[in-house]
Amino acid sequence: MNVATEGENVPMIKTEGLTKSFGKVVAVAGVDLEVDRGQVLALLGPNGAGKTTTVRMLSTLVPPTGGRALVGGHDAAREPRAVRALIGLAGQSASIDEKLTATQNLTMLGRLHRLSARTAKARAAQLVEGFDLTAAADRAAQTYSGGMRRKLDLAASLIMAPPVLFLDEPTTGLDPVSRNGLWDVVRDLVQAGTTVLLTTQYLDEADRLADRVAVIDQGRVVADSTAQRLKDRVGATGLAVVAAGAEAAERLRRLFPDRVSAVEEATHTVVFRVADAGVAGMRDLNGLLAAILDADIAVESYDIRRPTLDDAFLQLIGHGTAPGAVGAAGVSGVAGASGADSGAGLGGASGADEGADPGADAEAGTSAPGVAQSAASHPTPPSPDRSNPDYSNSDRANPDQANPDRSRPDRSHPAIPDQDSGAR
Amino acid sequence: MSIVSTPPELPGTRRLPSTSPAASDLDLTPVSRPALVWALSDIVQLTKRSLLHIRRDPDQLVSVSLQPVILVIMFRYLFGGAISTGSKESYINFLMAGILIETAALSATATSTAVAVDMLSGAMDRFRALPIANSAVLAGHVLADLARAALGMAVMVAVGLAVGFRPEAGPAGWLGALALTFLVTFALSWMAACIGLLGSSAEAVQQYGMVLILPIFFSSAFVPTGTMPGWLRVVAENQPMTQAIDAVRALLLDQPSGNHIPATLLWFTGLSAVCVAIAGMLFKARTKT
């Protein structure tokens, strides 16, 4: 594989003011991205945010209207051949030939990549085995399950072992088991030094796979950071206490009015901010619990809420401006923590204190805990105007253990105008 | 449903750890050969692909043969008795040339669907990211169509012989008739490729495909043009389908062909060239967004 640019300091993937309009519709409105060799960048955004268009421009399939898309230092619009020699693309619409078997698909593509007949065959066999498709290798791909199709599609994009891989929503529509399998494959590839740009609307996918997450909405990058930082940005831990009745809830709220971040009226739930840092957090929590016990308020249950990437995401794209808004019906923001306050939290986090101790945000009291994560027992749908079921699975594993520590140089920069993210 | 938690280890590694499916001890450098050699190789590969499609989907062959078979039966037994061929030829002998051309046209319509499916699915994206000429994908469909048409025509000749078709052509006549029919198929298939590139869905494209069939009904395929009203006769006698049908008919029945053969050659090579060019432009337009 001829990697045209071996220079270590050239970002493998780079876009500069990348823009694409289809007639009057602006699909991508000036996207700047940079992915270093061996890094994984997740392009995270809702449907229609411009993720796929960005990838299509980078992979030479669509010419940009403005700006530049560079892969390995080559301009995708001007040197498509050079770029194509470096990239593999696996798409959401698995672009395998359904009428052909896995072996036929891979052999044909190998030949079209200008491999000799023998090499193409051997490579196809390797990939079939590597992707665990041996049993189905001689069946038409139309008989495959969704997961097998994705695997074949990914295998097809890896025929030439490209150093740069674009994965356009690689796991959309897959069951959890297949998704995990694909994640493992991607991790292997990354470990082997492949640079990956992956688009996803699944936050935990970004959380688990990516070194960095660029949140894209309406054609713009609204945040470019690590998953952890994005979560920190949303704020600290919250203690959600479910009171036995509205009156008890009101008493709870009055207990520490300035620490209440949300009140969920329908469930009589009051959410208090809690410091996030280790011992301080425990002490804080202890104090809160003791005070509630002392006040002898009837409590049904409680749980500790940690911010998730979902929360960060929803806030960034402007659907979580009021804490608790995500929780849909019966959930309302409450004085002192809603609207402006959470906007401030976002602004604060995205500004100078990037990289500060996560706890700092909490103690500064600028952020809203437990924004989206309602009690785990009843996951709530997202705000109705953008009803994507994928955002509702917030009751998943603790986000902290999900993201293995990736010590990468911090390339994050603050979100583009905060009003952009807060006031939509 | 199989699970790929950890792909099995692959023998040997070049640049990747052994557990990665991207690992390969193979030399994956593209082989350097003259461009023309690779271009031909591409067309061979993509024709093979289209042929595999046909094999996987034998319904295509049924739909290519069914309509002509019905037409043969209908015209031979239902209308044939009432149609005068204007000569001493039996009607079935008169009919078969038109039927063969119709089979070719029907087969070509399948090309439009195949092209549309490629355009609308992710397949074309995959191909476009390859170092191949885009036209190779279309050429693959067109060439596979010749095979499909050949099968359809074989069926039709057999059916024709069974219901009384008695061609008088020698080997040269047959060869000529087949060559002309394939030329017509080729041209119509490129036209179909254009339709496939224009369509917004496979279903729509299938409907548009009718424009390839319709001219056959306004030609000398089923009735001698002499019985048509003046204006229609002018249209029918001068359109390319009539030229092709008259030429094939003359060759099959070993009759004087007038200038039908050169006219057919001219029409359909011209149409092929124009359609290849248009297909190229449409492809660019379709993918330039």
Image: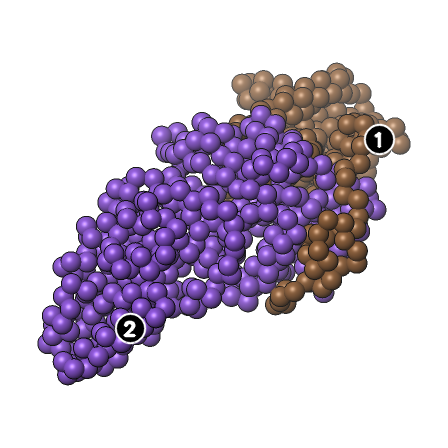
Residue A289 figure quarter: bottom left
| Position in image of residue B169 (x %, y %) | 85, 31
Chain that bears disc 2: A
Chain that bears disc 1: B
Residue B189 figure quarter: top right
Q: Colour of chain B?
A: brown
- Callout 1 secondary element: helix
Give the label, 1 or 2, closer to the camera. Answer: 2
Q: Residue at x 25, y 42 (%)?
A: A419
Q: Colour of chain A?
A: purple
Tag 2: amino acid: Arg
Residue under numbered circle 2:
A283
For the view shown, which residue lies furthest in the right direction? B171
Q: Residue at x 44, y 36 (%)?
A: A32
Q: Between A361 and A18, which is closer to the camera in this rendering?
A: A361
- Callout 2 secondary element: helix
Q: What crowding class fits label 2: few (fewer than 14 Cα within 10 Å), some (14-19), or many (20 or more)? A: some
Q: Residue at x 45, y 59 (%)?
A: A204
Looking at the image, residue A362 sits to the left or right of residue B20; the answer is left
Residue under numbered circle 1:
B175
| Position in image of residue B244 (x %, y %) | 70, 25
